[in-house]
Image (tube, grey):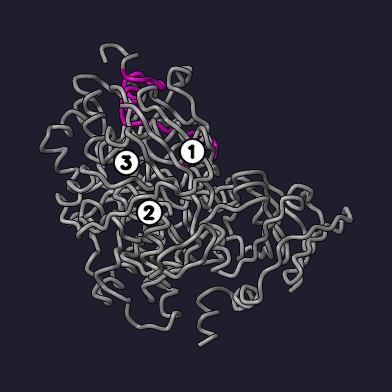
Amino acid sequence: MTMTQKILAAHAGKAEVRAGELVMAKLDLVLGNDITAPVAIREFPKFGRARVFAREKIALVPDHFAPNKDIKAAAQCAAMRAFAKEQGIVNYFEVGHDCGIEHALLPEKGLVTAGDLVIGADSHTCTYGALGAFAAGVGSTDMAAGMSAGEAWFRVPGALKILLTGKPGKWVCGKDAVLHLIGRIGVDGARYQSLEFAGDGVANLSMDDRFTIANMAIEAGAKNGIFPVDGQTLAYLRAHGAKRPRIYAADEDAEYARTVEIDLGALEPMVAFPHLPSNVRSVREAGGVEIDQVVIGSCTNGRISDMRMAAEVLRGRKVAGGVRAIVIPATQRIWLQSLEEGLLKVFAEAGCVVSPPTCGPCLGGHMGILAKGERCVATTNRNFVGRMGHVESEVYLASPAVAAASAIAGRIAAPGTIDGV
Amino acid sequence: MNRKGKAHKYGDNVDTDVIIPARHLNTSEPAELAAHCMEDIDAAFAGRARPGDIIAAGRNFGCGSSREHAPLAIKASGVACVVAESFARIFYRNALNIGLPILECPAAARAISSGDEVSVDFETGEIADETTGQTFKAEPFPPFMLDLIAAGGLAAYLKGRK
């Protein structure tokens, strides 16, 4: 069995499962946000139980349109807040108190451990695969059913093996690796399947790199992306007070539909052109596209190492005139850590504006919407038509280093190619 | 269950951001969502869609976000069925969970043109393009899924079985 199949089998109370089989499995955590939870809350009573299955196994995070962007968004956040209170939900994270973007926040809070089975009404729930958990995005009805029963049905997925070797060079990170992968296999290259990462190269990826890579598994159509558990994973889980890990590893003879090899050492900084995450080129081939805005943040790249990487490029330099650079540390803790490390000062002095944690511009919500014809380099995860604003605006996906270098250059650029970086 | 209407044809990788742009996700009221359905790929869709119409599309329909607002918007537009070459995983699950019938049928999805009169039989899986006279066969829904769709979705279906 693959690693994913072993976790599903364990949660379904079975010794073995096969790709294609349908199983009913127990859930360790059910997640929702201010967009998806209100729909689930509306559906919840229809499932016939008055209370959620376990009030400590639900996480509700106001992050997409929070801090409330308008009156309707405020009403949605209020509905979620009221439900959390009524149900005594422990893991509700209020703006300013303990807040953040869900997929950066939950691991930070130690709410996911290796071997867990997590569903979330958000497509980037697959992020937690970085911790050796099975985590998949679902819709609001599945979230409601999960909150009610503590179980969900799954079709056991087959898998692609992504064999990582080598060590990424300076200015190359998890984002470049996952963009390269999506560029190779396409936006439906792993549809209905797992992406199982393996190989010596895994040890050369930080936990933050792994979060970024697992986060974008959905952009290849995958059900989940998952990393093997190693010393770095265990250290991360310990440091964040997570529950005791249950470590699963793929069998030697696990079946894979396909193996894709990636030499991390051979990667260059990458950029995904509009309007698909698979439309990937190296920054070298980007042709110096001129830009109006840069966004550094999101559940993909708003973690502390992303802030450090961006600050390293921006330190002592200035954002080009005519470019708005928006930096969004993904959680309150990352924001505070960035403050303590002096990174916020670096950003401000370079001419960036620093936002409170929010998904905000990534999905065209608020805090940096694009006008007709404007172009943005973003460390986010999607560059679909109209994703960040006007239907004729453009989003280019890249790493924090590329985004920061582009902010300085006023065009898509890699660090190392702009003056003095 | 047999439905008939005009086809609206789209290409590959129709994502949930164009089905219902996130700027409209500050509501989950189906009628409000329907008013903006397909807005960023086909601004005239909301005014043109009639009850019983079908959407025909290419590969990976519904890719992207997990927003259930996407199938809700399509259903509230009156669309009786989406026929595509393939569907993204979360959309597939969400559509059936809210009672929007969707059929995977590459041949039909490729052959149907915008404006064609199309009928769909969910019990047999037969898709007929009455404008061109072509017929196609998709995998029919099993009885429980027909009941689930008729009930209007998973929640109502489970309640009805209690």
What residue appears at the point 48 percent right and 35 percent down from the top-left corner? A260
- Amino acid found under the numbered disc labelled 1: Thr
Q: Are marks 3 and 2 on the same chain?
A: yes
Q: Is A356 on the left-hand or right-hand side of A9?
A: left
What residue appears at the point 25 percent right and 37 percent down from the top-left corner? A206
* Numbered tag placed on residue A210 in the rendering: 3
Nearer to the camera, A55 or A403: A55
Whichever of labels 3 and 2 marks the residue nearer the N terminus, that label is 2
Mark 3 crowd level (few <14, some 14–19, many ≥20, 10 Å Cα):
many
Instruction: For mark 3, give the secondary structure.
Output: helix
What residue is disc 1 on?
Answer: A259
Q: Which residues are magenta?
A: A388-415
**Image location (x, y in percent) of residue B19:** 57, 52
- Amino acid found under the numbered disc labelled 3: Arg
Question: Which residue is most to the bottom?
Answer: B162
Q: CA distance from mark 2 to mark 1?
A: 24 Å
What residue appears at the point 71 percent right and 53 percent down from the top-left corner? B56
Mark 1 falls within which chain? A
Query: Magenta span has A373?
Result: no
What residue is disc 2 on?
Answer: A125
Q: CA distance from mark 3 to mark 2?
A: 14 Å
Look at the numbered discs 2 and 1 and tell me whether their residues touch, using CB distance below 8 Å. Answer: no
